[in-house]
Image (spheres, rainbow, N blue to C red):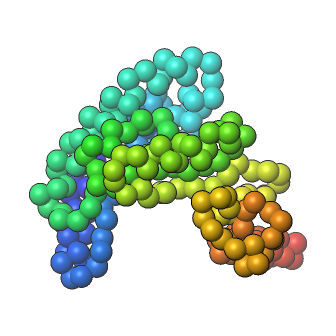
């Protein structure tokens, strides 16, 4: 994988030198999507390991493996790329933020983490580095219904008279409307078959 990352670093550097603000992301959820971190040869086999009893054994040492590779990756790309470097982790990775200029996060909200969600995001802002939400969303609330919203709280000063739903503690984002439109089209196309 290092040859792919160094090739990407060289290409990103050419873009950066042409005036584009490029950020190099050195991978995405390696523990799940790359071979050698979890038992199994396919994505389905790796994910299955996470759903069965004994998963703790499979997770033993996982962050150490991921962080060892990410340290090598950061060392390999920095001489080739003069911009900022990050990584898009999943929570299993338990990433050491030190090699990176931007803290990358998954920011999924569910019933399991709802009580600590905001505090967890605020904690990640405490590394003294910019934070990028690499993946966000919520768990499925019902068949085909996914939350893609902006959480409104006391910290964002979003005026109630500018909200689509003034009484609600959330506001649909453009992505919400795009998915809803796509879903309606998909349903119509499916029904026409």
161 sits left or right of 131 in the view: right
Residue at 62% across, 39% down: 116
> Tag count in the figure?
0
Residue 172's x, y, as percent?
Answer: 71, 69
Looking at the picture, tell me which residue is in the foreground, 141 or 120.
Answer: 120
Q: Is residue 38 visible?
A: yes
Q: Quadrant of residue 145?
A: bottom right
- Farthest residue toward the left? 79
Residue furthest out toward the bottom: 18
Query: Could you tell me which quadrant the C terminus lies in?
Result: bottom right
Left or right placement of residue 155 versus residue 105 in this view: right
Q: Is residue 96 above or below residue 130?
A: above
In the displayed structure, 77 sits above or below 45; it is below
- From the viewer's side, name the closer residue of 117 and 19: 117
> Residue 49: percent from the left, percent from the top?
56, 28
Q: Quadrant of residue 11?
A: bottom left
Q: Position of residue 178 (x, y in %)?
A: 68, 75
Which residue occupies 44% across, 58% down? 132
Residue 11 in view in this figure = no
Q: Is residue 117 left or right of residue 126?
A: right
Q: Position of residue 13 (x, y in %)?
A: 20, 70
Q: Identify which residue is drawn at 62% across, 18% down.
A: 53
Picture quadrant where residue 47 is located: top right
């Amino acid at each position: 994988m290092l040859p792919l990352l160094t090739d990407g670093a060289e290409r990103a550097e050419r873009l950066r030198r042409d005036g584009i603000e490029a950020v190099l992301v050195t991978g995405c959820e390696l523990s799940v999507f790359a071979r050698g971190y979890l038992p199994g040869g396919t994505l389905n086999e790796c994910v299955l390991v996470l759903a069965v009893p004994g998963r703790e054994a499979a997770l033993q040492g996982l962050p150490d493996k991921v962080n060892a590779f990410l340290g090598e990756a950061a060392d390999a790309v920095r001489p080739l790329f003069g911009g900022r470097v990050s990584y898009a982790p999943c929570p299993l990775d338990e990433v050491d933020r030190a090699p990176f200029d931007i803290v990358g996060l998954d920011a999924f909200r569910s019933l399991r983490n709802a009580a600590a969600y905001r505090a967890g995001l605020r904690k990640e802002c405490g590394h003294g580095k910019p934070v990028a939400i690499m993946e966000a969303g919520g768990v499925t609330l019902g068949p085909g219904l996914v939350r893609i919203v902006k959480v409104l709280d006391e910290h964002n000063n979003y005026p109630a008279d500018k909200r689509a739903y003034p009484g609600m503690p959330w506001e649909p984002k453009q992505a919400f409307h795009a998915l809803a439109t796509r879903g309606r089209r998909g349903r119509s196309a499916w029904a026409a078959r």
